[in-house]
Image: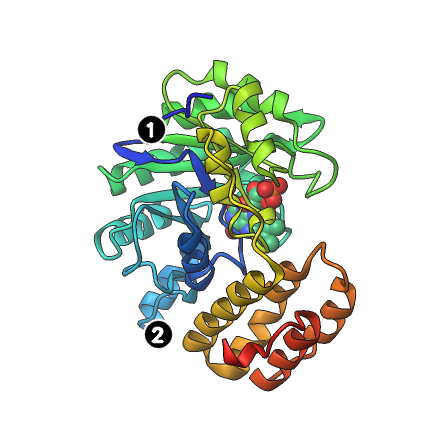
Amino acid sequence: MDVPSLCIGNIKIDPPILQAPMAGFTNAAFREVVRQFGGVGLLATEMVNARGFVWMDQNVAEHPDRLWGVAEEARPLAVQIWDNDPETMAKVGSRLVEEYRVSIVDINFGCPVRQVTEKAHSGSYLLREPSRMSKIISRLVEACSPTPVTAKIRLGCSRDHINCNEIARVVEEAGAAALTVHGRTAQDMFKGHADWERISEIKSHLRQIPLIGNGDLDSAEKVVHAFSNYRVDGVMIARACLGRPWLFAQAEAALKGTPIPAEPTLQEQRDVMLNHYRLVVERFGEEKGTVLMRKYACCYAQGKRGARFFRTHVARVATADEFYQVVRDFFPQDDPQES
Ligand SMILES: Cc1cc2nc3c(=O)[nH]c(=O)nc-3n(C[C@H](O)[C@H](O)[C@H](O)COP(=O)(O)O)c2cc1C
């Protein structure tokens, strides 16, 4: 198939396959691992709370840990922020553009977690307040110009209140440069399937800006299917890339009609995971890095024989030696410390 071309503002996203923001996961170490395989047109940070950024800036002269690596790493890179106050968002947006020189500022209007919705009236909570969404976007666009501002939404707050078509118009009119839609409602959380028909329908409510579809893409074939069957300009992958960062390269090949790289061998996967571990420990030290790595390691093991055994054991590792021992038991070919 012809590979669709995707531009967000003046930034070319090639291939039109995006790595989704995932809180607690898509930090600089993970992004580095993804970049090593390629096949991804745009990477994104975890969501950063704008109010928290301002508070840290004023009180401890530090910026959130979630901005680790952002200033230095390869571009294009999107930083995602969330809050419900247009001025705070604008303030943080302009700092991200001026100090961090980010490629794109993305706004989270999709998070369904109570702490963000009920407590902070942000994330997907704002889907019920299109006029506030509009203010947030337009202030941010003004503050970040010419850096593009994008929005990530769900279909609506609940199945009884799906308003993504209306929201799409609001997002575009407020000046956003692209819209990403996760094809579930906030109430769905991760239940059921992403509704790609609904995502596709949104296209006719947008005049110019690209539509990026997201939800349940876990194979190269599904990526091709999404482009062939739904009116999207780009696709975004989240959960499936956590344990398979090579998925983007496979999806790109499938889109371009070139041979799809084989799934890495168990040995190669082990090396990817160990490289990931090194990056995490380099940043956080052995103690914190090992604890942090537990959840990534579970992702790498997912779907493999013995994964439950691995999960149980890796969930308790506290030192590098313990981590290597569990890896050795699960990936028994060689001594992982030697690689
Ligand atoms: C652990 C986790 C953390 C997430 N954090 C964010 C986030 O920070 N910002 C955001 O917009 N979406 C976040 N999401 C949602 C994903 O970006 C994506 O929309 C969703 O997982 C559906 O895509 P998938 O089916 O490919 O996983 C998160 C999802 C998961 C599983």
Q: Where is mark 1, residue-wise?
A: 175
Which residue is rendered at x = 25% and y = 32% of the image? 10
Q: Earlier in the sequence, mark 2 or mark 1?
A: 2
* Closer to the camera in the image, 112 or 60: 112
* Closer to the camera in the image, 317 or 333: 333
Q: Where is mark 2, residue-wise?
A: 60
Which residue is rendered at x = 47% and y = 21% of the image? 1
Give the structural element (helix, strand or loop) at label 1. loop
Tag shown at residue 189: none
Q: Is mark 1 within 8 Å of ligand 1?
A: no
Give the structural element (helix, strand or loop) at label 2. loop
Left or right of 261: which side holds 144?
left
Which residue is rendered at x = 57% and y = 70% of the image? 293
* Residue type at numbered disc 2: Val
Residue 8 pos. (x, y %): 33, 32
Residue 65 pos. (x, y %): 42, 67
Which residue is rendered at x = 39% and y = 43% of the image? 42
Q: Residue furthest top?
A: 204
Vertically, is 219 above or below 287? above
- Residue depth check, mark 2 versus mark 1: number of the one nearer the observer: 1
* Closer to the camera in the image, 31 or 165: 31
Left or right of 174: which side holds 327?
right
Label pair 2/1, CB-CB below 8 angstroms: no
* Closer to the camera in the image, 2 or 204: 2
* Residue type at numbered disc 1: Gly
Vertically, is 164 above or below 188? above
Q: Quadrant of residue 137?
A: top left
Left or right of 147: which side holds 249?
right
Vertically, is 66 above or below 182? below
Q: Residues within 10 Å of mark 1 (few under 14, many from 20)?
A: some
